[in-house]
Image (cartoon, rainbow, N blue to C red):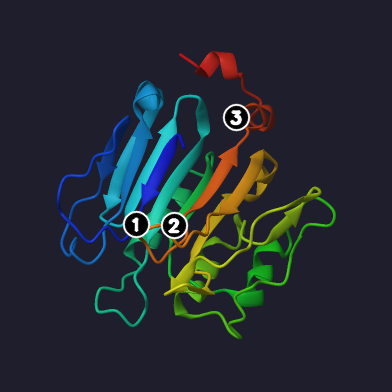
Amino acid sequence: FDVIFLNELKTDQTLSFPGYVCYRGMGNNLHRGGSAMFIKNALVHQIAEVATPNAECVLLRLKCLPHLIIMGCYIAPNDSQYHSFAPLAEIQDRILSSPQHKYVIIGDMNARFGTSRNAFLIDKDLPLGTGYRTPLDTVQQPNHNARYVMSAFKESLVMLNSLSAGGRHLDGNLTFRQGQTWKSELDTCFISNEFLPVVMDFRVHQSPILPSDHAPISICIDVNKAHQIAGTSVVDTMV
């Protein structure tokens, strides 16, 4: 992967992966959370902006994708003493202050949506037939975190988990497990409405051998399509 976001690091130690450069937010309570971004060495020269407005939020904008801001985010469960919506508030402020940009928001927000994710499709000009398949997370009502995320994002972003659009069916597998049993969907990804066509792939990577109780999620973006929608040239930005 070109860019990797890690959430709930639970350490203030220096992090490193061979072949990647790390950016992370600093602050209090890193032993209980913390977010970091790793970007390939070969892409560092493409960084137009990187910021850590919050210990649980990392922002990236690349020269080759000047109209797109990618943000990784972690929100603790609402019953945790470390719960805070401050990272989402930072994202909201950025979206409101930079409406010229499009956004990808990805991370572990401990938000369970169930069928309430349909709110992300209301009153939007999306391809005919766009909709969500029945989610595998059978929660009856959205939890506290999900309700906040919907209020913050539903006007301008689309949730990718379990989405079918333009003949493509994006992954909707569960992302959190207890032991060997996958229990719920806590890790999610969102993209600006207008940039939905640039999503080449979205996947949930379930694996019992990974040293985590969360399944990584990934998004693949079509750079050429992004420039086509934005009306810019790939050649002009690959400098």
Residue 226 image offset from top left, x and y in percent: 63, 32
| Mark 3 neighbour density, 10 Å: few (under 14) some (14–19) many (20 or more) | some
Looking at the image, is mark 2 or mark 1 earlier in the sequence? 1
Looking at the image, is mark 3 or mark 2 earlier in the sequence? 2
Looking at the image, is mark 1 or mark 3 earlier in the sequence? 1
Q: Which mark is residue 223?
A: 3
- Rendered image quadrant of residue 222: top right
Provide the residue designation for mark 1.
7
Residue at the image point whose x is 15% and y is 62% from the top = 28
Front position in the image: 82 or 121:
82
Q: Amino acid at mark 2?
A: Gly
Q: Which mark is residue 46?
A: none
Q: Is residue 224 above or below residue 117?
A: above
Spatial CA distance of label 3 from label 2 is 21 Å
Residue 210 image offset from top left, x and y in percent: 40, 57
- The quarter of the image holding the C terminus is top left
Q: Is residue 115 above or below residue 157?
A: below
Q: Is residue 125 visible?
A: no
Q: Is 198 positioned to the left or the right of 214 in the image?
A: right
Provide the residue designation for mark 2.
107
Q: Is 217 positioned to the left or the right of 161 in the image?
A: left
Q: Are marks 1 and 3 in contact (CB under 8 Å)?
A: no
**In front of the other: label 1 or label 3?**
1
Q: Are marks 2 and 1 in contact (CB under 8 Å)?
A: yes
Q: Is residue 164 visible?
A: yes
| Mark 2 neighbour density, 10 Å: few (under 14) some (14–19) many (20 or more) | many
Q: Amino acid at mark 3?
A: Val
Q: Element type at marker 2? A: strand
Q: Amino acid at mark 1?
A: Asn
Residue at the image point whose x is 60% and y is 29% from the top = 223
